[in-house]
Image (cartoon, rainbow, N blue to C red):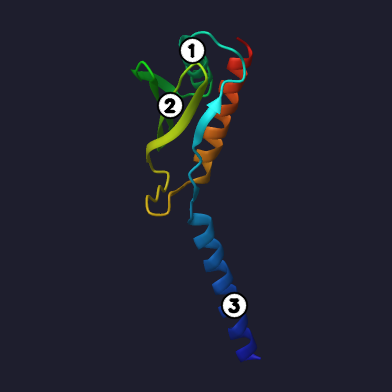
Amino acid sequence: MKKLWQKWVVVLSVVTMSFLLTACGGMPIKNVSNSSVSISIDKKEQVKKAIKTAGASLGWIVKEIDENTLEATLMLRKHVAIITIPYSEKEYSLLYKSSENLKYDAKKNTIHKNYNSWITNLDRNIQIQLSSL
């Protein structure tokens, strides 16, 4: 009976450790590359405004790097995500730049799963802003 109990303790320990290691691991980083601006826009400024408005509505701080690139920073509690946003009148991208306290692993190209949700929400809000132009 004691050996059976010991086996169950070992199995339970292995399962628990596997779960904890999986939970601590990251997800592949989601980048949005060359997302099409689905409506006909004459000026790149309209795309920039849509990106800034969408970002601000979600708490991103968006600043201009040059005439074709924005940088957005999201700070939530102790977590920081920074992305680069190249854009034109026809498309934009949301590209990982750096982060703090998000378990970023450069070798595996992984990050905390919440990062991908933030990028998905930002992309969706940009599309909403663009469709209202």
Residue identified by numbered label 3: 11
| Element marked by disc 1 | helix
- Quadrant of the rendering where the C terminus is positioned: top right
**Amino acid type shown at disc 1:** Lys
Q: Residue furthest left?
A: 66
**Amino acid type shown at disc 3:** Val
- Viewed as shown, does residue 104 lie left or right of 34? left
Cα distance, mark 1 to mark 2?
12 Å
Given this view, does label 1 or label 3 mark the residue nearer the observer?
1
Given this view, does label 3 or label 2 mark the residue nearer the observer?
2
Q: Indicate the position of residue 94 as horizontal and vertical percent values.
A: 47, 31
Query: Any mark on residue 49, and which?
Result: 1
Cα distance, mark 3 to mark 2?
47 Å
Q: Which of the two residues, 36 or 72, is positioned nearer the viewer here? A: 36
Query: Any mark on residue 112, and which?
Result: none
Q: Indicate the position of residue 75 as horizontal and vertical percent values.
A: 42, 31
Query: Any mark on residue 85, and which?
Result: 2
**Within 10 angstroms of label 3, few (less than 14), some, or many (20 or more) residues?**
few
**Within 10 angstroms of label 1, few (less than 14), some, or many (20 or more) residues?**
some
Q: Residue at x 50, y 62 (%)?
A: 21
Residue 76 in sight in this render: no
Please determine whether, in this image, residue 90 is positioned above or below residue 18.
above
Q: Residue at x 49, y 55 (%)?
A: 24
**Within 10 angstroms of label 2, few (less than 14), some, or many (20 or more) residues?**
many
Q: Residue at x 49, y 22 (%)?
A: 55
Q: Choose the circle earlier in sequence order: 1 or 2.
A: 1
Q: Choose the circle earlier in sequence order: 1 or 3.
A: 3
Cα distance, mark 1 to mark 3?
56 Å
| Element marked by disc 3 | helix
| Element marked by disc 2 | strand
